[in-house]
Amino acid sequence: MGSQYEILRKTPTLDEYKYLCSVAGLDNEINFNVAEISLKNSIFAVTVKSRDTVVGMGRIVGDGAIYFYIQDVIVHPGYRRLGMGKDIMNTLVEYLKENAPNKASVGVFIAKGKENFYEKYNFKDATPHTKGIFTVIKRCN
Protein backbone atom coordinates (compact mmCIF):
# COMPACT_ATOMS: atom_id res chain seq x y z
CA MET A 1 0.00 0.00 0.00
CA GLY A 2 1.17 3.52 -0.74
CA SER A 3 2.69 5.50 2.08
CA GLN A 4 0.78 8.64 1.10
CA TYR A 5 -2.62 7.20 2.07
CA GLU A 6 -4.38 4.70 4.31
CA ILE A 7 -7.20 2.32 3.38
CA LEU A 8 -9.86 2.11 6.08
CA ARG A 9 -12.44 -0.67 6.04
CA LYS A 10 -15.39 1.66 6.51
CA THR A 11 -18.12 3.23 4.44
CA PRO A 12 -17.53 6.87 3.53
CA THR A 13 -19.86 9.44 5.02
CA LEU A 14 -22.36 11.16 2.75
CA ASP A 15 -20.19 14.30 2.72
CA GLU A 16 -17.09 12.27 1.80
CA TYR A 17 -19.03 10.52 -0.97
CA LYS A 18 -20.33 13.82 -2.34
CA TYR A 19 -16.81 15.25 -2.30
CA LEU A 20 -15.29 12.31 -4.18
CA CYS A 21 -18.10 12.27 -6.74
CA SER A 22 -17.62 16.00 -7.26
CA VAL A 23 -13.84 15.88 -7.79
CA ALA A 24 -14.28 12.90 -10.12
CA GLY A 25 -16.90 14.74 -12.19
CA LEU A 26 -19.74 12.43 -11.17
CA ASP A 27 -21.85 14.82 -9.11
CA ASN A 28 -24.48 15.18 -11.86
CA GLU A 29 -24.83 11.39 -12.11
CA ILE A 30 -25.83 10.68 -8.50
CA ASN A 31 -29.06 11.39 -6.63
CA PHE A 32 -27.56 12.60 -3.36
CA ASN A 33 -31.03 12.79 -1.76
CA VAL A 34 -30.98 8.97 -1.44
CA ALA A 35 -27.22 8.33 -1.51
CA GLU A 36 -26.96 7.97 2.28
CA ILE A 37 -29.40 5.02 2.17
CA SER A 38 -27.35 3.45 -0.62
CA LEU A 39 -24.12 3.88 1.34
CA LYS A 40 -25.68 2.34 4.47
CA ASN A 41 -26.85 -0.65 2.42
CA SER A 42 -23.34 -1.44 1.21
CA ILE A 43 -22.18 -4.97 1.94
CA PHE A 44 -18.59 -3.80 2.38
CA ALA A 45 -16.77 -0.54 1.72
CA VAL A 46 -13.40 1.11 2.01
CA THR A 47 -12.53 4.75 2.47
CA VAL A 48 -9.05 5.99 1.60
CA LYS A 49 -7.58 8.93 3.47
CA SER A 50 -4.46 10.99 3.17
CA ARG A 51 -3.94 12.72 6.47
CA ASP A 52 -7.55 13.62 7.33
CA THR A 53 -8.79 14.10 3.76
CA VAL A 54 -10.78 11.47 1.88
CA VAL A 55 -9.02 10.70 -1.41
CA GLY A 56 -10.61 7.44 -2.54
CA MET A 57 -13.24 4.80 -1.96
CA GLY A 58 -14.77 1.60 -3.22
CA ARG A 59 -17.68 -0.56 -2.16
CA ILE A 60 -19.53 -3.80 -2.73
CA VAL A 61 -23.30 -3.87 -3.12
CA GLY A 62 -25.75 -6.66 -3.94
CA ASP A 63 -27.87 -9.29 -2.26
CA GLY A 64 -25.01 -10.73 -0.21
CA ALA A 65 -25.66 -14.27 -1.43
CA ILE A 66 -25.59 -14.85 -5.18
CA TYR A 67 -24.98 -11.39 -6.66
CA PHE A 68 -22.30 -8.89 -5.73
CA TYR A 69 -21.29 -5.71 -7.57
CA ILE A 70 -18.18 -3.65 -7.13
CA GLN A 71 -19.31 -0.05 -7.22
CA ASP A 72 -17.94 3.47 -6.80
CA VAL A 73 -14.23 2.78 -7.14
CA ILE A 74 -13.22 6.45 -7.08
CA VAL A 75 -9.73 7.93 -6.75
CA HIS A 76 -9.21 11.66 -6.31
CA PRO A 77 -7.53 12.99 -9.51
CA GLY A 78 -4.59 14.32 -7.50
CA TYR A 79 -3.86 10.83 -6.15
CA ARG A 80 -4.07 8.80 -9.34
CA ARG A 81 -1.10 6.78 -10.58
CA LEU A 82 0.01 5.95 -7.02
CA GLY A 83 -1.46 2.45 -6.98
CA MET A 84 -4.49 3.46 -4.93
CA GLY A 85 -6.99 1.97 -7.39
CA LYS A 86 -5.13 -1.34 -7.22
CA ASP A 87 -5.09 -1.22 -3.42
CA ILE A 88 -8.84 -0.52 -3.34
CA MET A 89 -9.58 -3.37 -5.77
CA ASN A 90 -7.27 -5.77 -3.93
CA THR A 91 -9.11 -5.04 -0.67
CA LEU A 92 -12.55 -5.49 -2.27
CA VAL A 93 -11.57 -8.70 -4.07
CA GLU A 94 -9.96 -10.06 -0.88
CA TYR A 95 -13.25 -9.45 0.96
CA LEU A 96 -15.18 -11.30 -1.74
CA LYS A 97 -12.79 -14.26 -1.76
CA GLU A 98 -13.19 -14.58 2.01
CA ASN A 99 -16.94 -13.93 2.26
CA ALA A 100 -18.80 -14.64 -0.98
CA PRO A 101 -20.17 -18.17 -1.32
CA ASN A 102 -19.15 -20.66 -4.00
CA LYS A 103 -20.47 -19.72 -7.48
CA ALA A 104 -21.30 -16.14 -6.46
CA SER A 105 -21.53 -13.77 -9.41
CA VAL A 106 -19.50 -10.56 -9.12
CA GLY A 107 -20.10 -7.69 -11.53
CA VAL A 108 -18.60 -4.26 -12.03
CA PHE A 109 -19.58 -1.26 -14.13
CA ILE A 110 -16.48 -0.02 -15.89
CA ALA A 111 -15.73 3.54 -16.97
CA LYS A 112 -14.80 3.72 -20.64
CA GLY A 113 -11.12 3.16 -21.16
CA LYS A 114 -10.65 1.26 -17.88
CA GLU A 115 -11.28 -2.26 -19.23
CA ASN A 116 -7.61 -3.29 -18.98
CA PHE A 117 -7.46 -2.26 -15.31
CA TYR A 118 -10.38 -4.52 -14.37
CA GLU A 119 -9.24 -7.42 -16.57
CA LYS A 120 -6.26 -7.73 -14.19
CA TYR A 121 -8.83 -8.81 -11.58
CA ASN A 122 -10.31 -11.44 -13.92
CA PHE A 123 -13.29 -9.28 -14.96
CA LYS A 124 -14.15 -9.82 -18.60
CA ASP A 125 -17.15 -9.95 -20.89
CA ALA A 126 -19.91 -12.09 -19.44
CA THR A 127 -20.36 -15.73 -20.35
CA PRO A 128 -21.46 -16.47 -23.92
CA HIS A 129 -25.03 -16.82 -22.63
CA THR A 130 -25.34 -13.41 -20.94
CA LYS A 131 -24.59 -9.77 -21.57
CA GLY A 132 -24.46 -7.08 -18.90
CA ILE A 133 -26.73 -4.14 -19.70
CA PHE A 134 -28.49 -1.57 -17.54
CA THR A 135 -30.83 1.39 -17.56
CA VAL A 136 -31.15 4.52 -15.42
CA ILE A 137 -34.55 5.63 -14.15
CA LYS A 138 -35.23 9.30 -14.95
CA ARG A 139 -38.16 10.94 -13.14
CA CYS A 140 -39.60 14.35 -13.83
CA ASN A 141 -40.26 16.13 -10.53
Image: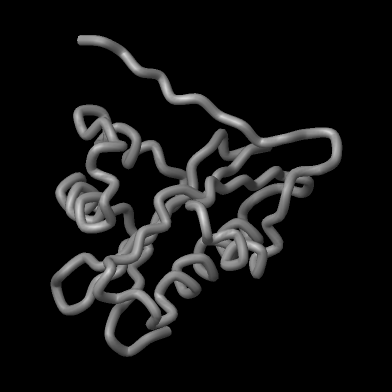
Measured as percent of width and height from the top left, residue 133 is found at: 61, 32
Q: Nearer the viewer, residue 67 or 113?
A: 113
Q: Nearer the viewer, residue 107 or 64?
A: 107
Q: Determine the residue located farthest toward the front in the rendered image.
A: 113
Residue at screen point 48% across, 52% down: 111
Residue at screen point 51% across, 53% down: 112
Name the colouring of the figure: one colour
In the displayed structure, would residue 117 be above or below residue 137? below
Number of disc labels: 0
Measured as percent of width and height from the top left, residue 103 is found at: 78, 46
Res. 120 image quadrant:
bottom right
Q: Determine the residue located farthest toward the top in the rendered image.
A: 141
Is 89 placed left or right of 13 in the picture?
right
Is 122 placed left or right of 75 in the picture?
right
Is 18 placed left or right of 97 in the picture?
left
Residue at screen point 77% across, 49% down: 102
In the displayed structure, would residue 117 be above or below residue 63? below
Measured as percent of width and height from the top left, residue 140 is found at: 25, 10
Q: Nearer the viewer, residue 5 or 43?
A: 5
Measured as percent of width and height from the top left, residue 7 is found at: 35, 72
In the rendered view of the protein, which quadrant contains the N terminus?
bottom left
Q: Determine the residue located farthest toward the bottom in the rendered image.
A: 3
Residue at screen point 28% across, 68% down: 77
In the displayed structure, would residue 93 be above or below residue 59? below
In the rendered view of the protein, which quadrant contains the C terminus?
top left
